[in-house]
Image (cartoon, rainbow, N blue to C red):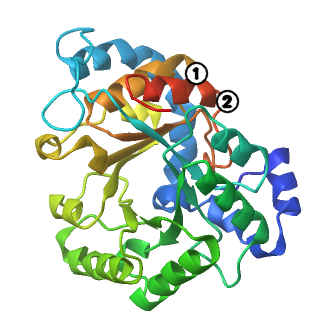
Amino acid sequence: MTDTSPRHRARSRSRPPSMAAAGDRNRRLLGLARRPALLAALAVAAVVIAALATVAVVASAHGAGTRGPGPRQLAHGRGAVQCQNTFVPAFFSPGPGWTQAITSKPPPSVMILDITTTGAGTAPDPGLQAEAARAQAAGIKVIGYISTDYGQRPPAQVEADVRNYRAWYKVSGTFLDLAAEGPAQLGYYRGLAGYIRRVDPGAMIWLNPGTYPDPRYLSIADVVMVSEGPYASYLRQQVPSWVYHYPAAKFAHTVFATPGSQLANAVRLSRSRHAGHVYVTDQAGGNPYDGLPSYWAREDAAVRVGCAHA
C-alpha cells in the first residue's frame, strides 16, 4: 500500500538524500511487507471491531473479571506483569517526533533507528547521527534496524550493517526485522547473534518475527517481538503457555490502529500477556510508524505506572 496523504508526500520531499529510500521503507518496516493486502482492511476494521469485542476479551484475558495484577508481578510466572517499558520505532525524520520522545518523562527505554529499507545504508546521515546522540545522552538505548528477509538475506550484508551502525551511530544493539519463526532458520540467527556479540560485546539484540516463534529463538535474542498488528487483531490473540516460563522482559508487543479510547485496555492486555516492552499507536495505513501516537504522553505514563524511575 502506498500512503498518498499530503503529510507523507511533504515529508518524503524534505528528507535528506541519504533517506531517499524512505517511501519503500515505510511499506516494509516492522514486517509490514508480510501483509500489504490485509493491512488497510485490518486498520479500517480496528475501530469498529474494538468497541464490540473489548468487554468479552477483557473478561477472557483476565479470567477473573476486572481483577488487576497483584503486587510485584514483575518478571516470572503466569499473570500480569506490573512494570513495563515503552519503546519507539523511530522511523521518521529528525525533528519534533524525536524531540518529543527524547524529552518524555520518563523517556522510552529503547528507540529503533532505521536509515533505509534494509539497514544502515552506504554513508552516515548527519541528522540522524545527531538525534541518536541526543537520545543516548538522555539515557535511551538506540538500536539499529536491519532486515533479514526471513533468513534469506546473506549474512555478510547483515554483518556489514551491524558494523556500520556501530561505527556511524554508536548504537547499543541491533533490531533484526523480517525474522523467521521456524526451526529451519535457527542456525542462521544463531550465527548472526554470535557475530554481533563478537564485534560488540554487550550489544542488545531484538528479533522481530511478529508472532510467537519456535521457543528456541528466546535463547538467541534479548528481546523477541512476538506480537505486531492492529488493535482489532490484538484483542483475539492467544498466548502460548510456554511464554510464562520466561521473564516478561524477553517479549515486546506492538499494537497499531488503536483508538485513544482503547489505549488503557491495550496496555492492560499487554500486561496480562506477559509483555515487558510495549508500543501502542493510533496511527494506521501503509506506515503506522511515521510518527509518535497522538496520545504518546498518556501512553508513556500508563505503561510505566508502577515502575521506579528517575
Judged from this view, the residue extending furthest toward the bottom is 156
Rendering coords of residue 4 (x, y %):
78, 51
Rendering coords of residue 85 (x, y %):
42, 38
One can see residue 129 in this view: yes
Q: Looking at the image, which residue is at 65% across and 69% down?
A: 115
One can see residue 259 in this view: no
Q: Answer yes or no: do the residues labelled 1 and 2 have beta carbons within 8 Å?
A: yes
Q: Is residue 172 above or below residue 36?
A: below
Which residue is the site of mark 1? 260
Q: Looking at the image, which residue is at 22% across and 59% down?
A: 218
Q: Looking at the image, which residue is at 64% across and 77% down?
A: 168
Q: Considering the numbered disc 2 on the image, is that residue within a helix, a strand or a loop? A: loop
Rendering coords of residue 262 (x, y %):
49, 20
Q: Residues within 10 Å of mark 2 (few under 14, many from 20)?
A: few
Viewer-closest of 102 and 150? 102
Viewer-closest of 169 and 28? 169
Q: Looking at the image, which residue is at 31% across and 29% down?
A: 271
Identify the mark at residue 294; answer none if there is no mark. Answer: 2
Q: Is residue 192 above or below residue 255?
A: below
Q: Residues within 10 Å of mark 1 (few under 14, many from 20)?
A: some
Q: Marks 1 and 2, how far apart in space?
A: 8 Å
Task: Answer with left or right where residue 122 lies relative to residue 110.
Answer: right
Residue type beneath disc 2: Ser
Residue type beneath disc 1: Gly
